[in-house]
Image (spheres, rainbow, N blue to C red):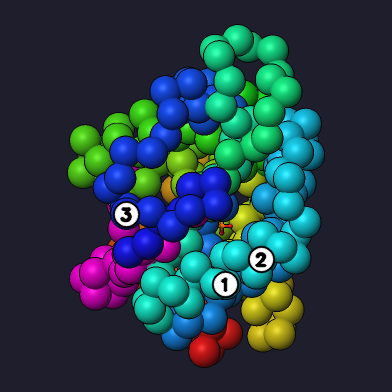
Amino acid sequence: SLAYFNGNIIGIDDPVIPIDERGHQFGDGVYEVIRFYQGKPFMLKEHLDRLFMSAKAIKLEIGKEQEELEALMLELAGKSGLADADLYVQVTRGVAPRNHLFPKCPASLSITVKPARELSHQVRSEGVHIVLLPDERWQNCYIKSLNLLPNVLAKQEAFEQGCFESVLVRDGMITEGSSTNVFIVKEGKVQTRPLSRYILAGITRLAVKEITGEQGIPFIERAFRPEELLEADEVFLTSTTSEVLAVTAADGRQIGDGQPGPVTRRLYECFQQKIK
Ligand code: PDD
């Protein structure tokens, strides 16, 4: 593993964040998680575009050009010596005496590169269980903000109920998971919520959209209700770390025949081809 903070490569456990760092005190920043496969980043440009979009949305000046940050990330990933890695990048509004108002100081940049967290073969082959919970987040979930308390609480609640993920419901409609996008398959058609301020525009979601196009699988962007999810033929989640992951039960009710379905398995296989 390798870590970087404001110009220096540091030990992953080094105590480096100043006490008045705004990410630490306010969660005043944005982040990305990027997967490296065989030393190569997956959809890096899309992740960088989203990072800069998130920063702009919170009026945060990153202080580096996109190309500069890209070069730094590739350099650090190379230095880590890891082929399959998760790169975490975080930009905050910097270090300044605690005051809600924006400080006049440069942004802080932290990066870590760690061995990729792979899901177990059992989870992959059997799928996962989810719980439905109210979406208690703010109105700007399209921003990949450091403020993840509602997501953390929802993920923990899922864990305590023996589940892998919580799927969130806002105004009677599914939004997304605490750290994943959510899809249903009904009569061969893949459906997921359209992009809006209520969900993150997942990069893996985009990859799946592209795959459905290539494979001639109908892809419908529309909001759906919890009952539609419970009655779907298949349900799956996507994220950088989960890739395409089958859901076989929701709120204790079996989805389809309780096995990862054919469309989900095909999308997972195509995804594996895409990352090679
Ligand atoms: N989570 N929705 C939310 C709320 C997320 O936090 C994430 C990513 C996704 C999926 O986005 P992508 O396919 O671009 O990874 C959807 C990351 C992995 C995390 O917080 O660790």
Q: Which mark is residue 74?
A: 1
Q: Is residue 146 above or below residue 208?
A: above
Residue 2 appears in the rendering: yes
Tell me whether circle 2 and circle 3 mark residues in contact (CB < 8 Å). Answer: no
Q: Using the numbered discs, state the Cα–Cα distance from disc 2 to disc 3 in whole angstroms.
A: 21 Å
- Name which residue type carries label 2: Glu
Residue at position x 32%, y 64% from top?
1
| Circle 3 Cα neighbour tier, 10 Å, few/some/many (<14 / 14–19 / ≥20) | some
Q: Is residue 149 above or below residue 217?
A: above
Kindly identify which residue carries mark 2.
70
Along the viewing direction, whichever of 236 and 195 lies nearer the viewer: 195
| Circle 2 Cα neighbour tier, 10 Å, few/some/many (<14 / 14–19 / ≥20) | some
The residue at label 2 has a CB less than 8 Å from ligand 1: no
Tell me whether circle 2 and circle 1 mark residues in contact (CB < 8 Å). Answer: yes
Residue 151 falls in image quadrant: top left
Tag 1 or tag 3, which sits nearer the N-term? 3
Bounds of the magenta segment: 111-131
SS for dot 2:
helix
Residue at position x 69%, y 20% from top?
103
Find residue 265 and report its horizontal and vertical position in percent: 44, 78
- Name which residue type carries label 1: Leu
Along the viewing direction, whichever of 171 and 25 lies nearer the viewer: 25
Tag 3 or tag 2, which sits nearer the N-term? 3
Residue at position x 44%, y 74% from top?
79
Specify whether 184 is left or right of 114.
right
SS for dot 3:
loop
